[in-house]
Amino acid sequence: MRSHAPPASVVVGAGQGGYQTAASLPEQGYQHRITLLSAEDALPYERPPLTKA
């Protein structure tokens, strides 16, 4: 069976790496739908690095 759905990408995980991947795709010319999957209820955000000082 052939799918007629438009091209799309799914990024699994909305941590820093997943968010950066989803954000960089359009910057690199990707023009299709991007879905970012996360187990969290909140939107992804940049978490500051933690240090043990």
Image (cartoon, helix red, strand yellow):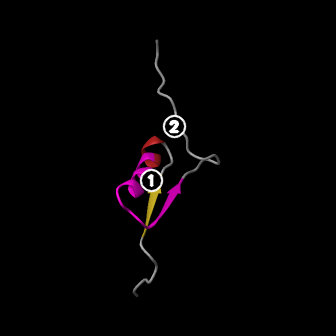
Residue at 51% from the left image edge and 48% from the top image edge? 14
**Residue at mark 2:** 46
Q: Position of residue 42 (x, y in %)?
A: 63, 46
Residue type highlighted by circle 2? Glu
Q: Position of residue 24 (x, y in %)?
A: 40, 51
Q: Is residue 34 magenta?
A: yes
Which of the two labelled residues, at mark 2 and mark 1, occupies the earlier sequence position? 1
Q: CA distance from mark 2 to mark 1?
A: 13 Å
Q: Dot 1: what SS?
A: helix
Residue at 41% from the left image edge and 72% from the top image edge? 7
Could you say which is closer to the camera, residue 24 or residue 1? 24
Residue at 49% from the left image edge and 43% from the top image edge? 15
Magenta residue span = 20-37
Residue type highlighted by circle 1? Ala
Could you say which is closer to the camera, residue 43 or residue 38? 43
Residue 45 falls in which quadrant of the image? top right
Q: Is residue 33 magenta?
A: yes
Disc 2 crowd rating (10 Å Cα; few below 14, some 14-19, many 20+) is few
